[in-house]
Image (tube, grey):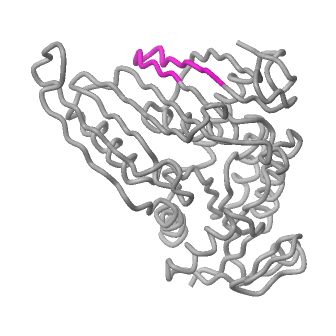
């Protein structure tokens, strides 16, 4: 049985602990968190070093604030451990490149990042339809991801740009961008507007409007990531030659985004004014966390490559994020960019 440890026992650490234990495929043997940990399901380590130096530990889950992730991933790989880390993988593409250099020298170690949205059943259904070619080619995509925050949000580490690395795009919009890449592979054109109009917290953008194009396939996509939506919203639309896939809602641990309502709209006759067929699939249960950990354990046990959430995926994603943020007057410097 796989022996696992967790660094960081906040919300995500607790979710990962539950999934590890419920999988029946791994034993959670140690947790380290510098803060007081109540109701720990296993032994508490005295330091991170204790975990990395323990030869009995096979896997380390990194569930810390963003700024610690690259360092701990590298230490884990150098210690000969398999590593699962939360997003974002880093603050820049160059940091991911450094991680990949270490990974290439850690023979047999698996590295996976928690791009959890790929593992939602609705997303998997959309992916299977696209890959089948049943509805023709993808023409364009549109994603909106909004959350509701109040002043208390700015009392957390996520509101410190030194710890978080950025605002709403790096915190939440990164998931939508990852889904675009999941469906379209890559984009070579990126344009963005990054604003800090309402909360006015230096280094923490509250809105990003970005558009992308893959010049080879012609696929275009638009993304809006916002923390001034004043309600929780998840909406992903993919329009294809033969119709559309429209997902509203996302089943999460908090439940604030509602159930996942996937509409499969077919336009076989290409008639104007509507679709010839429409099917709705409602997903009431979130199994994405378990699916994610299961995929990680499968790759370890069967010595397979990480298919979703690899360091290659992370590098492509962070290079896109760099281009969104790259203008010298972007919100990391307190202004707007394009």
Q: Residue at coordinates 51% horizontally, 56% vertically from top-left?
A: 255
Query: Does residue 209 appear to the left or right of 240 in the view shown?
Result: right
Kindly indicate the quadrant of the structure image that contains residue 312.
top right
Residue 34: give x, y in percent of width and height. Answer: 89, 70
Query: Does residue 41 appear to the left or right of 7 in the view shown?
Result: left
Q: Residue at coordinates 50% horizontally, 83% vertically from top-left?
A: 24
Region rendered in magenta? 208-222
Vertical arrangement, residue 324 with respect to residue 123, above or below: above
Residue 284: give x, y in percent of width and height. Answer: 37, 58
Q: Along the line of sight, which residue is nearer the eye, 122 or 218?
A: 122
Q: Along the line of sight, which residue is nearer the eye, 70 or 38?
A: 38
Query: Does residue 250 appear to the left or right of 98 in the view shown?
Result: left
Residue 244: give x, y in percent of width and height. Answer: 28, 29
Q: Residue at coordinates 79% horizontally, 68% vertically from top-left?
A: 79
Quarter holding the N terminus is: bottom right
Vertical arrangement, residue 332 with respect to residue 153, above or below: above
Query: Does residue 74 appear to the left or right of 252 in the view shown?
Result: right
Q: Is residue 215 magenta?
A: yes
Residue 145: give x, y in percent of width and height. Answer: 55, 35
Quarter holding the C terminus is: top right
């Amino acid at each position: 049985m796989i022996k696992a440890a967790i660094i960081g026992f906040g919300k995500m650490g607790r979710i990962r602990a539950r999934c590890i234990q419920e999988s029946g495929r791994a034993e959670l043997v140690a947790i380290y968190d510098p803060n007081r940990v109540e109701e720990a399901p296993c032994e508490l380590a005295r330091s991170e070093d204790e975990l990395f130096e323990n030869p009995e530990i096979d896997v380390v889950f990194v569930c810390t604030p963003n700024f610690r992730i690259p360092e701990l991933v590298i230490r884990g790989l150098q210690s000969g451990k398999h590593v699962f880390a939360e997003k974002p993988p880093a603050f820049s593409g160059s940091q991911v490149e450094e991680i990949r250099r270490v990974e290439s020298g850690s023979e047999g170690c698996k590295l996976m990042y928690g791009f959890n949205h790929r593992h939602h059943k609705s997303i998997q259904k959309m992916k299977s339809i696209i890959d089948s070619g049943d509805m023709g080619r993808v023409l364009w995509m549109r994603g909106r991801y909004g959350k509701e925050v109040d002043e208390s949000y700015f009392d957390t580490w996520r509101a410190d740009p030194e710890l978080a690395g950025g605002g709403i795009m790096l915190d939440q919009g990164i998931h939508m961008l990852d889904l675009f890449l999941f469906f379209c592979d890559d984009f070579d054109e990126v344009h963005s507007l990054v604003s800090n109009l309402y909360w006015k917290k230096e280094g923490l953008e509250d809105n990003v409007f970005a558009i992308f194009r893959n010049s080879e396939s012609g696929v275009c996509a638009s993304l809006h990531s916002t923390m001034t939506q004043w309600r929780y919203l998840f909406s992903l639309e993919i329009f294809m030659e033969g119709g559309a896939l429209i997902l509203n809602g996302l089943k999460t641990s908090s439940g604030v985004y509602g159930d996942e309502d996937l509409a499969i709209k077919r336009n076989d006759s290409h008639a104007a004014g509507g679709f010839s067929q429409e099917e709705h699939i409602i997903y009431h249960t979130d199994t994405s966390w378990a699916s994610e950990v299961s995929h990680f354990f499968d790759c370890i046990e069967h010595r397979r490559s990480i298919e979703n959430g690899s360091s290659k995926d992370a590098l492509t994603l962070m290079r896109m994020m760099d281009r969104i943020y790259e203008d010298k007057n972007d919100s990391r410097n307190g202004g707007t960019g394009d």
